[in-house]
Image (tube, rainbow, N blue to C red):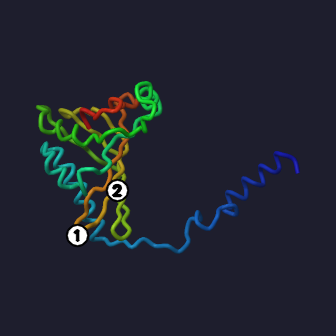
Amino acid sequence: MDKKTAAAALLIGLLAGGAAPGSFAQDQGFRLHSEAADIGKIGDLLDEFMQDINHKDGTDIQKLLLNPNVLFHPIDDQAAIDSARKTDARFDGIGPSALDGLVTLLATSKDTLQERVYNTEIRQDGSLGLVTFNYDFLIDGKVHHSGLEHWQVRKIDGQWKILSVTWTKYLPTGTMQPCQPRGTCDDR
C-alpha cells in the first residue's frame, strides 16, 4: 500500500470512529446528573455577577466566589507570554489573579461599566457546573474589549459558587490585549 492509500485509509478509519478508544467515543451511555433548578441557579449566579459589575460592587462579586484564591485571570496569547518571559523565564502564562484589579476598577471608576453576555451555555453534573459565554465589556456604552469567558462553578452548602473564571480579551480591532506581565489587569 502506498503512502497516499495508507493515509486515506487512516483518515476514513478516524472519521468512522474505528480508531477512537472507548474513553473518547461520543456516547458511552453516561448522562449528566443535571437538574433544571440547578441550571437556573447557575444562571442566576451569572446574572448577579453582571449586576454587580453594573452596580460597581466588587465586594458582592467577591461573595460569589468559592474563596479568595480562585483562578481569576485572562488567557494571554503566546506573544504576551514570550514577552513576560524576557523578565521571568519561568512565567507560566497566568500570573497573579486579576480579581483585585477588577474590584479596584469597580470601586474607583467614574465611568459607567457594563458586561454584556450572549451565547451562554450552562452544563451541570451534580456539584460541578460549567458556564461558557461570549462577552463585551463596555465603558460608557462603548465596547472596550470582548472575548470568550469560561467559569467553573461548584455547589456547596446548597449554593452555587464560582470556582474559576478565565477569559480571552480582544480589542474592538480583533487584536488580543494582554495584561501587564506578572501584574494584575487594571480593568476587566
Label 2 SS: strand
**Rendering coords of residue 121 (x, y %):** 37, 57
The residue labelled by disc 1 is: 157
**Rendering coords of residue 12 (x, y %):** 73, 56
Between the residue at mark 1 and the residue at mark 2, the CA separation in whole angstroms equals 17 Å
Amino acid type of the residue that numbered disc 1 sits on in the rendered structure: Asp
Looking at the image, which residue is at 35% across and 38% down? 95
Amino acid type of the residue that numbered disc 2 sits on in the rendered structure: Gln
Q: Describe residue 137's horizontal placement relative to residue 89 as left or right.
A: left
Label 1 SS: loop
Mark closer to the chain start, 1 or 2: 2
Is the residue 145 above or below the residue 128 in the image? above
Classify the position of the C terminus by image quarter: top left
Q: Which of 66 and 55 lies nearest the eye of the viewer?
A: 66
- Determine the image quadrant of residue 158: bottom left
- Determine the image quadrant of residue 36: bottom left
Is the residue 134 above or below the residue 90 in the image? below
CB of mark 1 within 8 Å of CB of mark 2?
no
Looking at the image, which residue is at 15% across and 36% down? 112
Q: Describe residue 167's horizontal placement relative to residue 158 as left or right.
A: right
The residue labelled by disc 2 is: 152
Looking at the image, which residue is at 43% across and 39% down? 92
Looking at the image, which residue is at 37% across and 34% down? 170
Dot 1 surroundings within 10 Å: few (below 14), some, or many (20 or more)?
few
Q: Which of 25 and 172 lies nearest the eye of the viewer?
A: 25
- Determine the image quadrant of residue 99: top left
**Rendering coords of residue 120 (x, y %):** 34, 54
Q: Which of 1 and 74 lies nearest the eye of the viewer?
A: 74
Task: For marks 1 and 2, give the one nearer the viewer.
Answer: 1
Q: Describe residue 91's horizontal placement relative to residue 142 as left or right.
A: right
